[in-house]
Image (cartoon, grey):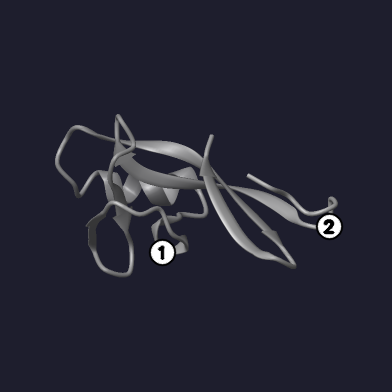
Amino acid sequence: MNYSNGMGIEIPQYVITTKSAAKFWNIKEDKFVKQLTEDCLFGTPALANDKLKDLDFGYVVKTARKYTDSNGIRIRMS
């Protein structure tokens, strides 16, 4: 991941995913998708865990990093 010259901010976020991180829960579409986007991010682990209770077992909450700078937004798994 290419970062700009330190002029951005990185924020920890949380996602509901499979153990292999192949699919991610999309909050807006209310389904699992293969692409990790901003629509998959929960602001706190409590919010992610509350939604996880509504889903089938086998899914986990993992930490992701959302990096924002003048070039745009990048999301990566921790």
Left or right position of 42 against 75 = left
Q: Can you give x and y, in whole percent of width and height, for residue 69 in the image?
A: 73, 62
Q: In the picture, residue 41 is in which quadrant? A: bottom left
Q: Can you give x and y, in whole percent of width and height, for residue 15 in the image?
A: 41, 46
Left or right position of 60 against 11 = left
Left or right position of 12 against 27 = right
Tell me the CA gap for discs 1 and 2. 24 Å
Give above or below for 63 relative to 11. Answer: above
Give above or below for 5 relative to 77. Answer: below
What residue is shown at x 39% (from left), y 48% (from top)?
48
CB of mark 1 within 8 Å of CB of mark 2? no
Q: Can you give x and y, in whole percent of width and height, for residue 39 in the image?
A: 41, 64
Q: Which mark is residue 7?
A: 2
Give above or below for 17 relative to 37. Answer: above
Q: Can you give x and y, in whole percent of width and height, for residue 71 in the image?
A: 70, 66
For disc 1, the neighbor class at 10 Å (few under 14, some 14 to 19, many from 20) is some
Which residue has dot 1 on it?
Answer: 39
What residue is shown at x 43% (from left), y 59% (from top)?
37
Which mark is in front, 1 or 2?
A: 2
Identify the amino acid type marked 1: Asp
Q: Farthest left residue?
A: 56
Label located before the other in sequence (1 or 2): 2
| Element marked by disc 2 | loop
| Element marked by disc 1 | helix
What residue is shown at x 46% (from left), y 43% (from top)?
45
Q: Quadrant of the N terminus?
A: top right
Q: Quadrant of the C terminus?
A: top right
Identify the amino acid type marked 2: Met
All told, the count of numbered labels is: 2
